Amino acid sequence: MQIISDVREPLVTGDKTYHDITQDIAGRVEDNPAPLWWAAMAFAITLLISGGWFLGDMLWNGIGRWGLNKTVQWAWDITNFVWWVGIGHAGTLISAVLLLFRQKWRTAINRAAEAMTIFAVICAAVWPIVHMGRPWLGAYWVLPIPNTFGSLWVNFNSPLLWDVFAISTYFSVSLVFWFMGLVPDFATIRDRAVTKFGRIFYGALSLGWVGGAKAWVHYEALSLILAGLSTPLVLSVHTIVSMDFATSVIPGWHTTIFPPYFVAGAIFSGFAMVLTLMIITRKVYKLQHYITLEHIELMNIIIMVTGSIVGIAYITELFMAWYSGVPYEQYCFINRATGDYWWAYWSMMTCNVISPQVFWFKKVRTSIVLTFIMSIIVNIGMWFERFVIIVTSLHNDYLPSSWTYFEPTLWDVMCYVFTFGLFFTLFFLFAKFFPVINMAEVKAVLKSSNHHVYKNRDTIKDPFDVV
Amino acid sequence: MAHISNTMEVDTHYILGVYSDEDDLKHGIDHIREKGISIYEVFNPYPVHGLEKNLGYGHSWLPKAAFMFGALGTTCAITMQTGMMGGLWPMIIGGKPFISIPDFVPVSFEMTVLFSAFGMVGSFLVSQDLKPYKVPRIFDRRSTDDKHIVAIDLAKNTLSEAEIKTVLQEAGAEEVNRKDFTEEENNPSFFKYLGDLFKYGVRSTSRPK
């Protein structure tokens, strides 16, 4: 029996057949790239190369190229790291948490969102590596291997080391989850191949998958367990990232609300980035029948909810600073809102707490243009959130003689641009060579969620007939 | 048994029933199984929920493998951390004990997940014989596009080919085809497959012209 909600729309519109799904999605991989794709790729590679030049220069000359000083020893590097990791969280949330909750609308967006996760984590991983100054020695500092300076091991009491384990586990498990999801779709493209290259390339990637019913039984179990593992994993990753700050004794960082607050913020910014990318992909690849307004609206609701959670967290922080009675803590929060960096604090508040409230209106939730604008505003706001937490907690420390105002240099900006170049290059390559929508999963929901079934919104009464 | 394997036919012959709809497929499978025909395998473009019940397949054992690998990961993580922090080079950090269990929770958790996920995926790939250089035995290329294919092995059934075809038609199959695999196709060589591909090009595709 299938009960159709009055407030839900079908997931696949436009009277699509199974073959249409294959044709619409695999066809994008098989067609020659559009001029728009080349233009986008050229733009991404320009960012990559220009940013890469500055990054190389920074590595050659040292991190003195950045605007760091003895008071603000961490600024854009860790801000960008937390921001990129946070963006990554939406992919896992969509594919794992929504799978556990049986939210079928994930099927159209999980592939691209997981790809985004992987690329965002790669961009995030750039920062801890390059900020070491001499990254070629990094293996000794972060990995549990005995080193040549004596058999001194890494420190398992340090949250920075927990981060190494969390991020690398998160990256590799997400990669495996994403790849296993791609295998049946690669098999579809292999079987549709008309060129030798297509047959060999997608044949190798499909691992010889033929879709036997026994294999599908195991495959379904695999997806479910990987989702079950990824759910606590994704929560642990941003929890541990927040512990980089929360386990310290710096006023402004030393708060127990950080783990849930960071996780909510991560989901918030991640969904915004998914929307930014999916609205473009949907338009360029004409996927309006698969990524419908219903999908966009549901994502907007998640943005509104997580944005409000983040808002409550900001207010709780202020309350706790007052209630704790610790003058340093109180000063830190007053300084955030009214000190030198007031503009960053209020940008954060406007972008993250106030602006998502427009999603209470259905007109705004279902408007593509407004959603796109909002998705960018949210990501700007989330970048400011990390900047505010990091820089405003450091720049006025205990000793007024060392108070300072951090200003980024060109190298700060261009190294950040480099990660954008990396992210977009990887994403555009993915969008061209891999199927952007999970064909097998969309086919699996087609029969129960097309417009024929939804037309009359009849509840199908026969309890023996599984629709 | 040597004399049997020498004379045993190594080519295999299958009768394929083609379905477009998952519910027709499930009813069809019930009908075929009622007639006492053993089904070799069904190939689907997407996971059909409940199909394993019609086919009489059990649950997957992969969750057990995942648990075992996870337990191994936890054990390794705790051993590594207590060994390095408590045995090999004890250090006083923040006045904490050398073996400070709460601090070991995050890394132990991450390694549990890591071992569990990779162990399970590895078990899946090995048990299903999935590998990049595998030459798949493809019954019908449309089975990764929009058709469900029921394959019946002639050698495993006592009914004749004509009888099986009749049953498949009764069971609502849209098309009934025959597919033969030679001995070589049953035990394909990857290098020969590559060689043939370069020699003859792509000979079959599910992409419509």
Image (cartoon, helix red, strand yellow):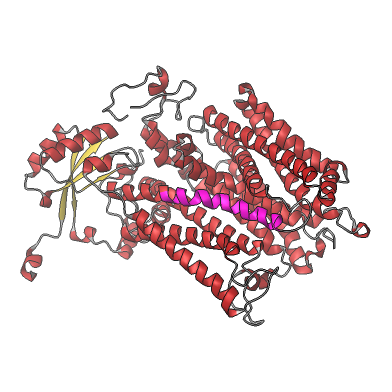
Q: Residue at x 63, y 58 (%)?
A: A125
Query: What segment is highlighted magenta in the picture?
Result: A225-247
Residue A343 image offset from top left, x and y in percent: 84, 41
Position of residue A348 in the picture relative to residue A184 (left or right): right
Nearest the eye: B201 or A185 = A185
Whether B59 is among the magenta residues is no
Residue B7 image offset from top left, x and y in percent: 7, 64
Q: Residue at x 21, y 33 (%)?
A: B27
For the view shown, which residue lies furthest in the right direction?
A401
Q: In the rendered view, would you say A163 is above or below A301?
A: below
Residue A156, quarter of the rendered image: bottom right
Query: Main structural element of the magenta stretch: helix, strand or loop?
Result: helix
Q: Residue at x 37, y 49 (%)?
A: A221
Residue A133 appears anywhere in the view: yes
Residue A451 image offset from top left, x and y in percent: 42, 23
Q: How many marks?
A: 0
Nearest the eye: B60 or B188 = B60
Q: Residue at x 57, y 65 (%)?
A: B101
Q: In the rendered view, would you say B47 is above or below A253?
A: above
> Which quarter shows the C terminus of chain A?
top left
Residue B174 appears anywhere in the view: no
> Which quarter shows the N terminus of chain A?
top left
Position of residue A464 in the picture relative to residue A299 (left or right): left
Residue A72 image offset from top left, x and y in percent: 82, 58
Whether A237 is among the magenta residues is yes
Nearest the eye: B125 or A235 = A235
